[in-house]
């Protein structure tokens, strides 16, 4: 049986020139993907230059039964692409794949996590370029910023540390 999930895809950012890759729209950061078995997770999380062979499951308190899969070695590799999500405990390297879980722990389509919720609650980065969305007059508007000093994963960690103090 096939299920659908949401892919968080920061690889649409062309990190060399700070723009979205040609033909992509900001909302393409969240894409729908089909899930038929656990091998699909490796395929979804892999991208050009990075073959994922180990993943981890992350649960969010505000997702109520949904979880997302991330590259288990994303923090230890030479990542260019990152994302962070509201309620997450750290930035994550590479892509993310959101699925739901049934009462027995089997993967199903997400129960409560929608594309709109993800767009409102994630930020993606490629090296020193960040892209996130802001709600203005009931529309999601893409906002970007650049870091001169460090890749955004370092900026995010520093912001989290400052906010915790």
Image (tube, rainbow, N blue to C red):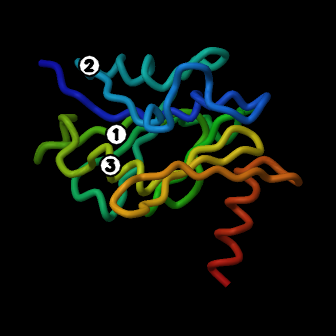
Residue at the spot x=39%, y=24% of the render? 41
Residue at the spot x=87%, y=52% of the render? 148
- The foreground one among 42 and 135 is 135
Coordinates of residue 123 in the picture (x, y in percent): 55, 51
The quarter of the image holding the N terminus is top left
Which one is in front in this view, the residue at disc 3 or the one at disc 2?
3
Side of 74 where 54 appears, left or right: left
Which numbered disc covers residue 116? 3
Q: What element carries label 2?
A: loop
Q: From mark 3 to mark 2, how far is it between C-alphas? A: 26 Å
Q: From mark 1 to mark 2, how far is it between C-alphas? A: 14 Å
Above or below, 2 relative to 10: above
> Would you call the spot at circle 3 few (<14 residues within 10 Å), some (14-19), or many (20 or more)?
few
Coordinates of residue 53 in the picture (x, y in percent): 52, 21
Q: What element carries label 3?
A: helix
Which one is in front in this view, the residue at disc 1 or the one at disc 2?
1
Q: From mark 1 to mark 3, how far is it between C-alphas? A: 13 Å
> Would you call the spot at circle 1 few (<14 residues within 10 Å), some (14-19), or many (20 or more)?
many
Quadrant in the picture for residue 92: top right
- Asked if residue 61 can be seen in this view, the reply is yes
Above or below, 39 relative to 4: above
- The foreground one among 145 and 67 is 145
Side of 89 where 125 appears, left or right: right
Which numbered disc covers residue 62? none
Which numbered disc covers residue 37? 2
> Would you call the spot at circle 2 few (<14 residues within 10 Å), some (14-19), or many (20 or more)?
few
Q: Earlier in the sequence, mark 1 or mark 2?
A: 2
Which numbered disc covers residue 98? 1
Coordinates of residue 159 in the picture (x, y in percent): 69, 68
Q: Which of marks 3 and 2 is nearer the N terminus?
A: 2
- Asked if residue 53 can be seen in this view, the reply is no
């Amino acid at each position: 049986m096939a299920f659908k999930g949401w892919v968080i895809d920061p690889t649409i950012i062309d990190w060399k020139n700070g723009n979205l890759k040609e033909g992509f729209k900001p909302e393409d950061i969240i894409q729908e993907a089909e899930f038929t078995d656990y091998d699909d997770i490796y395929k979804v999380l892999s991208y050009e230059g990075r073959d994922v062979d180990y993943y981890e499951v992350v649960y969010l308190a505000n997702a109520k039964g949904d979880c997302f899969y991330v590259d288990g070695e994303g923090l230890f590799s030479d990542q260019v692409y990152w994302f962070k999500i509201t309620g997450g405990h750290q930035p994550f390297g590479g892509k993310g794949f959101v699925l739901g879980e049934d009462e027995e722990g089997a993967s199903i389509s997400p129960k409560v996590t929608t594309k709109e919720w993800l767009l409102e609650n994630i930020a993606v980065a490629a090296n020193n370029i960040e892209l996130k969305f802001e709600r203005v007059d009931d529309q999601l508007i893409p906002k970007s910023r650049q870091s001169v000093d460090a890749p955004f994963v370092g900026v995010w960690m520093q912001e989290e540390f400052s906010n915790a103090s």
